[in-house]
Image: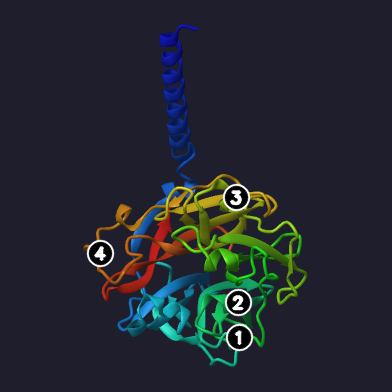
Amino acid sequence: MDRKIFLKYLATGACALAVADMAWATERIRKGKYSWLYKHLQPLHRILEEDGYYVWGCSPILADDGKVHVFYSRWDANKGMGGWLNGSEICQAVADNAEAEFKHLRVVLKPRGPDFWDGTTCHNPLIKKVDGKYALFYMGNANKKTNTKRIGLSVADDLYGDFRHPSKPLLLPGPTGAWDDHCTTNPAFVKHPNGKYYLFYKSWNTEEYEHPKFAIKGNRKYGLAVADALEGPYIKLSVNPVIDFSVLGNNEQLEDAYIWWEHHRFNLVCRDMGYYGDRKGIIMHSKTGLEWSKPQFAFDEVSHYISQPPKPKHLSKYGRFERPQLLLNHDGKPTHLFLTTQGGKYQSSSPFVMRIR
């Protein structure tokens, strides 16, 4: 081949490869990007803005009388954002409907002291009605650090009943070296039509967390444990993790999953941590809970829906939504999306409600 032709061939080939890479990246973002949920969200307002508190992790449930209860985390604002790890308590509020004013009812669970597995924080509640009872899943820790984070379950006969601290965690980390040896946290739960109880949980590896190769320490994945009864024992699947974005490279990951059963499949909405970015939410589906569809956008960043003042220096997560939770009607269909974000009246954090049109 003539030298000029050969060099031109190389240049054209390299350019073609670059164009192909760009086209792949663009296609990943564009193709199937917007989910049905994304297209049907209507932003409403913040709720539960409490002076002197950061409010986080708001889980809603529709009561038999039509009122909406939420179980949420809060902690002393003097602790700053980090208070979620060393002083959070779980509270309950109620409203006449999802779009009305929520009024604080009571503190449901609070840290009990260092002698208990949930002695220094009670956080990230998830409330579900299961078998005629109310199951409150949550995360606790015992040393104000992430390595003692454990999932617990408290059960009450009714929404106004006594949610007692369980004597031990519901699910423990894996053995040293396992992908989930650091903790168990951020529970997502579904009672399957087959009668089994499915508990999805977030975790990561301690070695990757303590000796990180990326800005975000560790890589958050989701595992699945299944039980024959609500209160366990829950047995982890051998194929775990069932959701693992790390294989995509660049330390891509996800967190804050909410999972529900609809259309004969599992449906998951969560916070994205790398697939598209870190300021949006994604949604996926699965027939089995093991293999999941490609992510689509579930919700956008805060600025897409409302205007806010400039970012305060002390709020590092300002401008993004976290902890997505759905309000389901009595037929199991989602009617509202509850999120949490920094900012608001007291420049701390509070939940935000969106209608699903």
Q: Residue at x 55, y 61 (%)?
A: 220
Q: Residue at x 32, y 52 (%)?
A: 304
- Using the numbered discs, state the Cα–Cα distance from disc 3 to disc 4 in whole angstroms: 34 Å
Q: Count residues near mark 1 (Cα–Cα under 10 Å), then give few for <14, some for 14-19, many for 20+.
A: many
Q: What is the x, y in percent for residue 181?
A: 64, 69
Disc 4 designates what residue?
Answer: 311
Disc 1 designates what residue?
Answer: 117
In the picture as drawn, the residue positioned furthest to the left comes out as 309
Against 101, is 106 above or below? below
Q: What is the x, y in percent for residue 107?
A: 47, 87
Which secondary structure, mark 2? strand
Q: Identify which amino acid the numbered label 1 is placed on.
A: Trp
Identify the mark nearer the N-term, 3 or 1. Answer: 1
Q: Residue at x 60, y 72 (%)?
A: 183
Q: Count residues near mark 2 (Cα–Cα under 10 Å), then give few for <14, some for 14-19, many for 20+.
A: many
Disc 3 designates what residue?
Answer: 285
Identify the mark nearer the N-term, 4 or 1. Answer: 1
Q: What is the x, y in percent for residue 122?
A: 52, 82
- Using the numbered discs, state the Cα–Cα distance from disc 1 to disc 2 in whole angstroms: 8 Å
Disc 1 vs disc 2: Cβ atoms closer than 8 Å? Answer: yes
> Mark 3 or 1, which is nearer the eye?
1
Which secondary structure, mark 1? loop
